[in-house]
Amino acid sequence: MKNIVTLMNFVRGVEPRLSMDLYGTTVKQMELTDKFKLKTTYLLQYDAFIQECYAKLFNQKRDYVEVGLWLEIVQPLCEKVGVAWRGREGFAWDYHSHVSMVVGYTETEKAKLIDEAFSEFRKTFGFYPKTVASWVLDSFSVNYMNEKYGIDAAFICREQWGTDGYSLFGGYYNQAYYPCKENILCPAQTEANEIKVPIFRLLGCDPIYQYASKIESGNEIFTLEPITWGDLKAGGSDKNWVDWYFENTFDETRGGAFNYAQVGQENSFGWDRMKDGLIYQTQRIKELKDSDKVTDMFVSEAGRWFKHNFDFSPVCTQTALNDWSNKNKKSIWY
């Protein structure tokens, strides 16, 4: 059984909702990466890598750092290609899905926005990104990026209900699959209908409580995100929950084709909220790697590994056979 972990942080260039030291947070994340030297992928939004400070930081050669594209739509990207900016006044990035996600644009607009993002990325770093992620992508965009730019992997948000004003429901719970050309959430049923780019799911969902956690606790977020959620005793800021999640996720006695987890955080939550959880998770991954229990991979590397090993979407499972909350609940996702 292959246990794969990808450490991935993504980088925004603006946060219009509150005062935030985005660059300083990214520098702190990089210092953590420099300390442990685990393979880490940083995905940069357009409004970040057009800034000189980010370009300088990520053009410093590190064998353990990979740079890719976080594909959310921002005002300077729209203005560069003549697409009308749909965000609210004063918001150069607007989180509403019809504004910041490619699904809110026509296919002609999507192609223009993607081409500009890839072109400017290449001007900044000297190559096209091999990894692309966003909370929401669509089949047209992934297929377009694959056929024109040969990307290795794409990431979308975990399963969620109502969080951030939209829902992703009924797709793979974890791991990866080849999507069909009609619906990004559905694995293709025939090879002819496959987009030959594996779709990985961002963030690690609690396999027992993720869907019903708001009903039981008043909070719907039980994931590996390392930020603190007040007094919530679960999720990526809680050491006991993290240990439980890794124990169940990387249990080599069960699982499908491979086991997988994504670790990391966007810079727009700020270093103070994420530091304790992110530091602990990184330490634990280093310990698991040193004991040969997990393999750290760049995101693009995980995509190439998947394509090398699977011609068709494999069986994947996510299980939890013990319960961190001591309610004796279990789950098996297939």
Image (cartoon, rainbow, N blue to C red):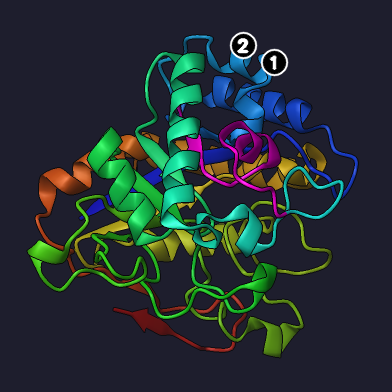
Q: Which mark is residue 20?
A: none
Q: Secondary structure at mark 1?
A: helix
In the picture, measured across the screen, residue 321 lies left or right of residue 77, that is: left
Q: Position of residue 309 (x, y in %)?
A: 12, 49
Residue at the disc numbered 1: 53
Give the quarter of the image for residue 172: bottom left
Q: Which residues are magenta?
A: 67-86
Residue type at the position of mark 2: Lys
Q: Which residue is mark 2?
A: 56
Residue at 28% x, 51% y is: 143
Residue, x 62% and y 63% (percent of image)? 97
- The image shows residue 180, relative to residue 36, as above or below, that is below
Q: Who's the residue at 56% across and 80% down the image?
A: 209
Along the line of sight, which residue is nearer the eye, 49 or 74?
74
121 to the left or right of 96: left
The residue type indicated by label 1 comes to Cys
Q: Position of residue 182 (x, y in %)?
A: 29, 69
Asked if the stretch drawn in magenta spans residue 71, the answer is yes
Q: CA distance from mark 2 to mark 1?
A: 5 Å
Q: Residue at x 81, y 47 (%)?
A: 91
Label pair 2/1, CB-CB below 8 angstroms = yes
